[in-house]
Structures are given as C-alpha cells and as structure tokens.
Image (cartoon, rainbow, N blue to C red):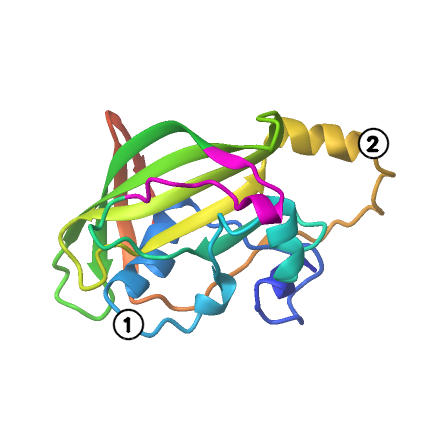
Amino acid sequence: MEASRFGFDPSLPQGSKFDPTDADIVAYYLLPRAVDHLNPHEHAVIDADPCSCPPWELMRRHGHAGSDHAFFFGPTTKSGGHRANRTVPAEEGGGVWHGQTSVETDLVLVPRGGDGREINIKYKKCQFSYLDSERKATGWVMHEYLITDPPLPVPGAVISRIRMDPKSKKKKKQQQPAPANNDSSALVNTGEPGCAVASSTAGKSPSMRAP
C-alpha cells in the first residue's frame, strides 16, 4: 500500500494515498522543520540530498523503488536562499535538475487551540526537470518549497517533492499490465497538525481550503 511507504499505519484501507497539497506540504512538514519543532509525521519525508544521485536511484535507495513520487529534506542553505548547484555527481551517473518556473505564494495559518490569531507566511515553489548525463529529458520533476517570510530559526530549510511527470507516468502505465480493480481509495489523514490552513493565494488566484 502506498501510504505505508511513507510510514503511515499499514492497517489503512488498501489504496490509501499520501498526496498533500502545496499548502499542506508547507504548513505541516516544512514549517515545523523551519522552526525546529518536533513533527510526529516527519517520517513521511526522507532526510537526503535530492541531488546526490538520479531520481530513480534516489527512490530505490530509500525504499521507494517502483514509485513515482517521494518527499525529501535536502541540505539547508546558509543564506536562506535556494542552492545554486543541482548537478548529480559524475560518479553517480551525472545529470542535472534544470530550473523551469518559480512562484511565490501567500499562506494564512490559524494555530489550533489559540485565540484565532492568523499567521501570514510567504513561500516559494520552484520547479525543475531532470536531464540525464546527455542532457535529455527523463520525465522526472522536482518541486522545491522554501519559506521566504517571516525569518525563521532554520532559514534555509527546504523540502523537495520528486515525482514522475503525469504524461511520462501515463506512458509508463500504458506499457504495463492493468492492475487489479480496487474500489477502496482514500487520502491519508496525517493526524492533528498544530495549524489549520485558512487560505493560500498565488498571484491573483486564491485557493480556499476548510481547516
């Protein structure tokens, strides 16, 4: 079951998925790391440099062989900005994560058990595509998340989501036998986070989510 790969209860229904939104990734996983707070669900994110080897090998080394997505806490940056070099070492096969887009988003959080006071933060999401040693596209994509405001105790904390591009994933599935039909499918409940996401806005396209 997919959810058990991320360390969640293996007794969850067959077909349960761990597929957090951008706001969930920032509020429930990146923010606790950035403020150096204990997070009981941090097991879902692997502590490993996403640029240490090609993405498929990274998946294999950390128990996600055959998977098309996983989450990583990469090395922090002293300046609090994104790392400049995302090249895989030649001894690991070479390749590079090539930058494509970058978007800054406002996120409003409401701490649970508090007085209703809202916390406003900004985070940046950057997208990269992985090119192999011959600089050919592979279908792998990485999204990096970094909180840019306010200043936090661990300013360079970064979480990366590495996944197979949907088109490449579809093509890959077409080349494989169809899986057995399963009617049970659910999103994983990650427990009781310390904050609820009140709203998230990127540019002029606000996205409202229930707490």
Horizontal side of residue 187 vs 117, given as left or right: right
Quadrant containing the C terminus is bottom left
Residues in magenta, as a range: 82-97
- Residue 56 in the image, given as x and y percentages of width and height: 65, 46
Numbered disc 1: secondary structure: loop
Residue 64 falls inside the magenta stretch: no
Q: Which residue is mark 2?
A: 175
Up-down: is 112 above or below 25? below
> Which residue is at the front of the view, 30 or 14?
30
* Label 2 crowd bin: few (<14), some (14–19), many (20+), radius 10 Å: few
Q: Marks 2 and 1, how far apart in space?
A: 44 Å
What's under tag 2, amino acid-wise?
Gln
- Residue 40 in the image, given as x and y percentages of width and height: 42, 74
Q: What numbered label is drawn on residue 37? A: 1
Q: Choose top left, top right, bottom left or bottom right for residue 187.
A: bottom right
- Residue 164 in the image, given as x and y percentages of width and height: 60, 38
Main SS, magenta region, reads: loop
- Residue 24 in the image, given as x and y percentages of width and height: 38, 52
Q: Choose top left, top right, bottom left or bottom right for residue 111.
A: bottom left
Number of marks present in the image shown = 2
Numbered disc 2: secondary structure: loop
> Which residue is at the front of the view, 77 or 146?
77
